[in-house]
Image (cartoon, grey):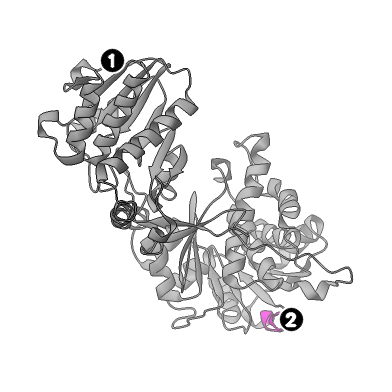
C-alpha cells in the first residue's frame, strides 16, 4: 500500500520553497527556471504540434515562470508572444531577471491586451498571471486577461495554479479554465477540491528536485488517498461464514422514499456484508423483497417497534429516505443510542442539525456523510460559506459532532480527529439521485467487515467513485445509482 500524497496551503508551499533553495544551496531564480522548464516540458509533451505559444504574465513569481517558458520556446524557435499585465519596467527580483532572460532570447512582449491575437487551435495559451498567493476577486487588467484566456481557441496550460483559484480552499469566482495545470514543490489542496477539480484539467506535479527531508519540516493541510493508498479488505479464508462479515441494519424509507433505503441495502450486500436487515415502512416490503430478496426486510411503524431490531446488528446506517417527520425522528432517536457504530446520511443529518434529536450526543464511532447543503445545516450557516472553504467546513462539522465526517463532492473531504483526507473519485454523471444511498450502504458494509470507521470511509469513497467511473464508460448522462451495483461487487475485492 502506497503512502498518501500530502496537500499543502499556499503559505506552506512558500516554506517548502525556502527550505528547498536552502537545502539545494541554489538562488531562488534557479528554482524559478526549473519551474519554467518543467512547465515547458509538459507543454511540449502534451501538444508537440503546437505552432505558436501565447504566455500571459503577471508581475510576481508566477509571471517570472511564464517569462522563462517564453524564453525556452524562443530557444526552440517556436513563435511566442508574452502578454504582460504588469509593465516589465515595474518588475523586481527574480521576475525581472526572468523577463530579461526572455528579452535576450528575442521574445516579443506586448503590454496592451487590445493587441491580443485570439490565436487558433494550434496556439497553446499559458496562464502565468497569478500564483498561489491570490485571494479575493480578480482586478483589472488581470480580470480581462483571464476572460481572453478563456475565450482562446487553443488549449490552456496553467502554471502552478489557474489564476483566480484559491490554493487553500479551491474556491473561485472568475478564473482560468485550464486543460493542464503544472504545479511545483508541493501539491496545493485547492487544486483537488471545490472548483479546483473543474478548473485545473489534468494536474501534473513536479518537485523541482526538492529533497525529501524538506517535506518533513512542513505540515500539510490534508492527505490525498487513491487506489494505491486506501486500505483494502483482506482475502477471505476458505472456511469463512456469513456471521464473520457483519450484520448491517439499514433504517429508512418513509412513505414515498422506499427506494433510497432499498438501494442502501443493496449496496451493503454488494460490498460484502454477511447479513443485511432493512427497517422501513410496511408498504415498501414487497418492493424490497422483489428487488433484493437476500435482505431481511422488517416493517416498522414506530421507534418502539424498532427496538428489537437493534439487538442483532454490528453496524447501523440511518437516513436513506428517512424523512423529517416524527417517524424518522423516532427511529433516529432509538438508533442513535445503540451500542454499535453508526452511519448517518440524508435526513438523519437534517434531523441531527435540528438539535432536538440526539442533542448533546458525541460519538467517535459514527460516520456522518453530508453534502454541501447538509453540512451548512449542521453548521447553521449558508451553503456559500461551505463552498468558500470546504476543508474548514468539514473540520468544523467534525469538531462539533466528533467521529468521522465525509463532506461529499468532486474532491471529497474526510475529517477525523487526526486530520483531513481527500479523495478524488467519480465523475459528473454521478450527479443524480440515489448516489449517496449507495455510499451509505458501502460504508456500513465495510465497518461490518471489521474496518474502523475511518478506514471504511476512505475505502468506501474511493470504491463508490470508481464504481461510478466504470459504470460511466457507457455514458455519463443517464447514469443511475443502481448501474453501479455490479461494479461495487467487482471492485471491493
Q: Is residue 16 left or right of residue 280?
A: left
Secondary element under disc 2, as helix, strand or loop, is loop
Crowding near pointer 1: few (<14 within 10 Å), some, many (20+)?
A: few
Q: Is residue 310 magenta?
A: yes
Q: Is residue 98 left or right of residue 426?
A: left
**Residue 256 at least partly seen:** no
- The secondary structure that dominates the magenta segment is helix
Q: Give above or below for 222 relative to 135.
A: below
Is the N terminus in the top left, top right, bottom left or bottom right quadrant?
bottom right
x, y percent for residue 420:
45, 64
Residue at the spot x=45%, y=61% of the render?
374
Residue where numbered disc 2 is placed? 312
Q: Residue furthest right?
A: 239
Residue where numbered disc 1 is placed? 117
Q: Give above or below for 270 relative to 137.
A: below
Of the numbered discs 2 and 1, the one sitting upstream in the chain is 1
Is the C terminus in the top left, top right, bottom left or bottom right quadrant?
bottom right
Label 2, label 1: how many angstroms apart (C-alpha)?
70 Å
**Residue 255 at least partly seen:** yes
Q: Which residues are magenta?
A: 305-311
**Quarter of the image holding residue 279?**
bottom right
Residue at the spot x=63%, y=48% of the render?
466
Residue at the spot x=43%, y=50% of the render?
193
**Quarter of the image holding residue 220?**
bottom left
x, y percent for residue 143:
23, 33
Q: Give above or below for 286 relative to 30.
A: below
Q: Nearer the viewer, residue 150 or 482?
A: 150
Amino acid at each position: 500500500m502506497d503512502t498518501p500524497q500530502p496537500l499543502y496551503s499556499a503559505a506552506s508551499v512558500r516554506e517548502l520553497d525556502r527550505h528547498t533553495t536552502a537545502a539545494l544551496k541554489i538562488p531562488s531564480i534557479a528554482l524559478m527556471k526549473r519551474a519554467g522548464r518543467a512547465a515547458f516540458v509538459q507543454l511540449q509533451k502534451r501538444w508537440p504540434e503546437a505552432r505558436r505559444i501565447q504566455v500571459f504574465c503577471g508581475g510576481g513569481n508566477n509571471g517570472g515562470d511564464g517569462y522563462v517558458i517564453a524564453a525556452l520556446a524562443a530557444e526552440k524557435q517556436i513563435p511566442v508572444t508574452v502578454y504582460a499585465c504588469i509593465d516589465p519596467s515595474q518588475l523586481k527580483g527574480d521576475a525581472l531577471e526572468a523577463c530579461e532572460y526572455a528579452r535576450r532570447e528575442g521574445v516579443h512582449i506586448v503590454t496592451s491586451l487590445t493587441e491580443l491575437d485570439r490565436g487558433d487551435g494550434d496556439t497553446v495559451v499559458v496562464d502565468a498571471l497569478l500564483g498561489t498567493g491570490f485571494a479575493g476577486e480578480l482586478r483589472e487588467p488581470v480580470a480581462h486577461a483571464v476572460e481572453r484566456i478563456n475565450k482562446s481557441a487553443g488549449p490552456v496550460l496553467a502554471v502552478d495554479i489557474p489564476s483566480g483559484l484559491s490554493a487553500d480552499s479551491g474556491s473561485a469566482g472568475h478564473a482560468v479554465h485550464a486543460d493542464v495545470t503544472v504545479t511545483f514543490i508541493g501539491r496545493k489542496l485547492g487544486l483537488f477540491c471545490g472548483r479546483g477539480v473543474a478548473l485545473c484539467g489534468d494536474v501534473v506535479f513536479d518537485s523541482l528536485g526538492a529533497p525529501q527531508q524538506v517535506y518533513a519540516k512542513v505540515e500539510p493541510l490534508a492527505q490525498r488517498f487513491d487506489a494505491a493508498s486506501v486500505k483494502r479488505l483482506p482475502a477471505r479464508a476458505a472456511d469463512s461464514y456469513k456471521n464473520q462479515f457483519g450484520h448491517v441494519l439499514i433504517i429508512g424509507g418513509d412513505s414515498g422514499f422506499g427506494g433510497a433505503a432499498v438501494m442502501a441495502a443493496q449496496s451493503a450486500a454488494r460490498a460484502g456484508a454477511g447479513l443485511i436487515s432493512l427497517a422501513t415502512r410496511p408498504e415498501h416490503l414487497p418492493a424490497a423483497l422483489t428487488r433484493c430478496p437476500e435482505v431481511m426486510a422488517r416493517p416498522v411503524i414506530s421507534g418502539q417497534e424498532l427496538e428489537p431490531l437493534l439487538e442483532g446488528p454490528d453496524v447501523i446506517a440511518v437516513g436513506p429516505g428517512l424523512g423529517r417527520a416524527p417517524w424518522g425522528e423516532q427511529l433516529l432517536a432509538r438508533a442513535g443510542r445503540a451500542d454499535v457504530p453508526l452511519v448517518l446520511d440524508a435526513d438523519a443529518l437534517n434531523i441531527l442539525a435540528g438539535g432536538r434529536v440526539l442533542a448533546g450526543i458525541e460519538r467517535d464511532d459514527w460516520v456522518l456523510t453530508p453534502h454541501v447543503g447538509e453540512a451548512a445545516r449542521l453548521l447553521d450557516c449558508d451553503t456559500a460559506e461551505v463552498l468558500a472553504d470546504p476543508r474548514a467546513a468539514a473540520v468544523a462539522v467534525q469538531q462539533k459532532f466528533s467521529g468521522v465526517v465525509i463532506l461529499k463532492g468532486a474532491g471529497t473531504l474526510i475529517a477525523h480527529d487526526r486530520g483531513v483526507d481527500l479523495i478524488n473519485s467519480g465523475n459528473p454523471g454521478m450527479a443524480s439521485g440515489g448516489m449517496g444511498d449507495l455510499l451509505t450502504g458501502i460504508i456500513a458494509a465495510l465497518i461490518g467487515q471489521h474496518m474502523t470507521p475511518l478506514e471504511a470511509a476512505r475505502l468506501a469513497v474511493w470504491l463508490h467513485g470508481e464504481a461510478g467511473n466504470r459504470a460511466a464508460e457507457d455514458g455519463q448522462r443517464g447514469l443511475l445509482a443502481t448501474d453501479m451495483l455490479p461494479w461495487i461487487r467487482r471492485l471491493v475485492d
